[in-house]
Amino acid sequence: MSEGQVRIGVIGAGGIAAVHAAAIAEAGNVVAGTCDVHRERAEVLAAGHPNAVIFDDVEALLADDSIPAVVVALPNCLHSSIAVQALKAGKDVLLEKPMATSIEECDAVLAAMEDAPGLLQLGFVCRHAATTRSAMEAIESGRLGRIYRADATMYRRRGIPGLGGWFTTRSMSGGGVLIDLGPHLVDLLLHLCGRPKVESADCSITSHFGHPPSGYRFTDMWAGPPVMDGPFDVEDGATALLRCEGDLDMTLNMCWASHLPEKVLPDGVTLFGEKGAMHFDIWGDTVIVGTELDDASVDIRRPIKDGENWNTAFRRQHEMFSHNVGTRTAPTSTAAQGREVQCVLDALYRSNEARGSVEVAG
Ligand SMILES: NC(=O)c1ccc[n+]([C@@H]2O[C@H](COP(=O)([O-])OP(=O)(O)OC[C@H]3O[C@@H](n4cnc5c(N)ncnc54)[C@H](O)[C@@H]3O)[C@@H](O)[C@H]2O)c1
């Protein structure tokens, strides 16, 4: 192992854990261990990473003093309790989104951080996308002026993760598409708009694809074959309005499943400012800005750099994590921001129940 490399344990060896493990290696660090209640998944992950020890359980991995840092890539219901355990064991933590399934669970993580030496970085990977970073540069250079409206969309056609498994079981996930894709979209808009306070939320959620009409089997659903008679007590679509301080409105539209052909609408962020407007597809390769120069309307295309693509976002996330670990630098994707996003999600669910606008908790 060369100097500066960080030995990282990956807790959970499911779908996103494999992406983290690859990104850990690409960032020049070492996958030092993994564990999963399905041991065979840990074996598959470890097969691609020769230094990875397979531990019997989370406790055994956390007890290994040669592993200073961990990624928590578990079902949402375990995020806060395992993050607390990891912090108490003295580890630095990269915690997948959502931070937790409730504001109370976020508070438990924040309380554990007060007594722990470790850092905690939230897995808001969309911030590291090349498109987002290009967009941020343009915003910081003043290209848009004051932003008065921000829209974010993620539409999938057959994108219910593990239909019939933990993702679609509320007691394990905390909700459906809103708590799954919502953290990315809410954090992204807050990040790009300078983290304004969200004052109120109004949301409607829908559920159409968990128990489809007969004749539809959805054999090509996301992340493995769907278990059509498995649990599905969550939403698969959401549309929302967030009113923020500073006269800024945000809208969110997302669905896990629909009959919409793929990519007819981009997974996009659109920002409207008083001096310019911007649009980009989060997974795309260009940010387009409309503005006025010398009394004429102009379009400025900002292609992302060669060699960059969506996957480099995970590598960059891990470059930042290992830099923070190595230099003891406070992460910029903070637990406080994770809680802020959770407060917005909480308000969105409450507003759906109330069938109207509700205040966002502080
Ligand atoms: N950042 C992103 O773009 C992104 C993408 C996908 C998933 N995620 C997040 O990552 C997390 C994991 O999602 P996933 O798609 O990898 O799910 P997954 O179901 O594929 O993987 C979770 C793994 O955790 C294991 N597990 C469950 N309980 C455990 C325990 N007590 N100890 C050890 N292992 C245990 C499961 O067996 C499973 O293999 C979720 O919170 C999800 O929101 C983030």
Image (cartoon, helix red, strand yellow):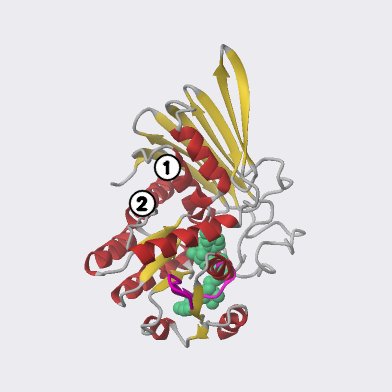
Q: Is residue 87 above or below residue 174?
A: below
For image coordinates 33% across by 39% down, the residue present is 197
Residue 107 in the image: state x and y as whole percent. 28, 60
Callout 1: helix, strand or loop?
helix
For image coordinates 57% across by 66% down, the residue present is 26
Residue 259 in the image: state x and y as whole percent. 71, 48
In the rendered structure, which disc, 1 or 2, sits on the residue that comes first in sequence? Answer: 1
Q: Amino acid at mark 1?
A: Leu
Label 1 with label 2: CB-CB less than 8 Å: yes
- Please name the residue that numbered disc 1 is placed on: 190
Which of these two is toward me, 248 or 230? 248
Residue 339 in the image: state x and y as whole percent. 35, 54
Res 99 visible:
no
- Magenta-highlighted residues: 1-16
For image coordinates 66% across by 62% down, the residue present is 222
- Please name the residue that numbered disc 2 is placed on: 337
For image coordinates 51% across by 85% down, the residue present is 53
- Residue 208 circle label: none
The residue positioned farthest toward the left in the image shown: 115
Callout 2: helix, strand or loop?
helix
